[in-house]
Image (cartoon, helix red, strand yellow):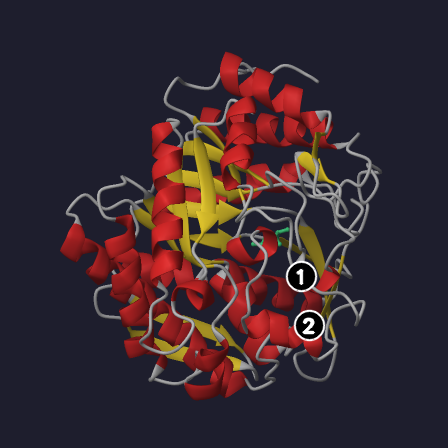
Amino acid sequence: MQNRFPDDFTFGVATSAYQVEGGIENDWSQWERMGKLKEPDARCGRAVEHWERFESDLGLVQELGASAYRLSLEWARLEPRPGEFDAAAVAGYRQRLEAMRARGIRPIVTLHHFTNPLWLQDRCGWHTPQVLPAWRRYAKLCAELLDGLGAAVITFNEPMVFVLGGYLQGVMPPGVKDAKQAAAAIENVARAHVIAREELLLRSKALTCGISQHLMVFAPARRWNPFDQALTRIAEENFNHGLLRALTTGELSMRMPAVISLKARIDGARDSMEFLGINYYTRSHLKFVPRPPFAEFGFRDVHGRGLTDIGWEDYPEGFLQVLKDTKRYRLPVWVTENGIDDRTGQRRPGFIHRHLQALLAARAEGVDVRAYLHWSLLDNFEWLEAWGPRFGLYRVNLETMERQKTPAVDYFRQVATSRELTAP
Ligand code: FCB
């Protein structure tokens, strides 16, 4: 059994701006005020004050033995009004990214991680063509901001989660339930990825750019039910692979019968990723229901490991499966998120161990996985679930903001620095 990571394998951690920085006003903060979270009074607010505590939080990244840190830029902070950039925010991000370089931590920068400025939603949502010039202006700013830092760039985090949640299921902002708008938004996201590359390429010829795609394992809720089986195939092909196909072949084609049908050439999208970023968490069992959107999903504790605290299946076997499945793209694979909501911190070392075992097994089978970024460095604001979940390697006291090691910190550091996978 292979248990060594090569010397050039990257261990890192990930966060996103809105979930940790604090003091951001965007479409999610409005969503919170509309009472849309699981607990209607919950707010992201000061989050975990990562904006103020950035420098000492970088100390934690180093304590983990990590050589890369994935964070996101917040569009609403950088461009609070259309066409007006906030110079202090631009300088603030620049300074933070330079501080990372100074400590030898490679920045991996996400340009869009679920959130949007409020003005974008009011004027030109992701389903409208007007979003593209607005996005180009933002992407150009990001390209300037990142110039010379040697950062890798992730244009979009989990675009299918963002679009389907926001425009088809209506459970995330802007809360729309409209298949036509969802289809238009998917196409615009694919075009926006190309636009961001164009702007980045104007600054630097050596581009390392991709997306972070949520890859979920799907299974039929009723094993022998042909509808559930069909649903499983459709989810797999569209949710997991639809956009990845578009960004490798240039052809966007999705078909979710009676929901979304989409076919478009995306100029410039062919071979438009230097790496394939994947986020892996769990498996979902799908059940066909005879009304839109025709699917219900749920999580099962098939292996008796116990569901994670957020209620997801702990399923490392699926990690191996999705990793093997990425071979078809012939791209280096970076795991840009993987983690567990573990409110006591006791389960996380075992979770990491099993998932890294799966990763090494995938490597042994020829999958070119080059990075593992754990979600997350810190406890943070978990979208609709707000402050219940605890994904942080460091636990945050939400009153005092004090950071505290969970047992996984020492384990992670040991693996990252020795490059050898041993049991916790
Ligand atoms: C992913 C998101 C990330 C975080 C984790 C738990 O889907 O990209 O922001 O919420 O789930």
Residue pictured at 31% horizontal, 49% vertical: 209
Badge 1 amino acid: Cys
Mark 2 lies on a secondary structure that is helix
* Disc on the earlier residue, 2 or 1: 2
Residue 272 in sight = no
Q: Are marks 2 and 1 in contact (CB under 8 Å)?
A: yes
Q: Is residue 394 above or below residue 277?
A: above
Badge 2: residue crowd in 10 Å (few <14, some 14–19, many ≥20):
many
Q: How far across and how far down the image is residue 199, in percent?
A: 21, 61
Q: Position of residue 278 (x, y in %)?
A: 48, 47
Q: Is residue 199 visible?
A: yes
Residue occupying image coordinates x 42% and y 81%: 184
Name the residue rendered at 43%, 72% in the picture: 80
Q: In the rendered view, would you say 177 is above or below 191?
A: below
Label drawn at residue 32: 2
Identify which residue, 352 or 282, lies in the foreground.
352
Residue 245, located in which quarter of the rendered image? bottom left
Q: Considering depth in this image, is 216 or 6 the residue closer to the camera?
A: 6
Q: Is residue 396 left or right of residue 262?
A: right
Label 2, label 1: how far apart the Cα atoms are: 8 Å
- Residue 129, disc: none
| Residue 219 vs residue 342, the one in the foreground | 342
Task: From the viewer's perspective, tell me whether residue 25 is left or right of residue 201.
Answer: right
Residue 243 is left or right of residue 271, and the answer is: right
SS category of the residue bearing label 1 = loop
Q: Which residue is mark 1?
A: 44
Counting the numbered discs, the total is 2
Callout 1: few (<14), some (14-19), or many (20+) C-alpha neighbours within 10 Å?
many
Query: Which residue is painted at 62% across and 62% down in the image?
Result: 232
Q: Is residue 221 above or below residue 153?
A: below
- Measuring from the top left, give residue 129's x and y in whole percent: 34, 84
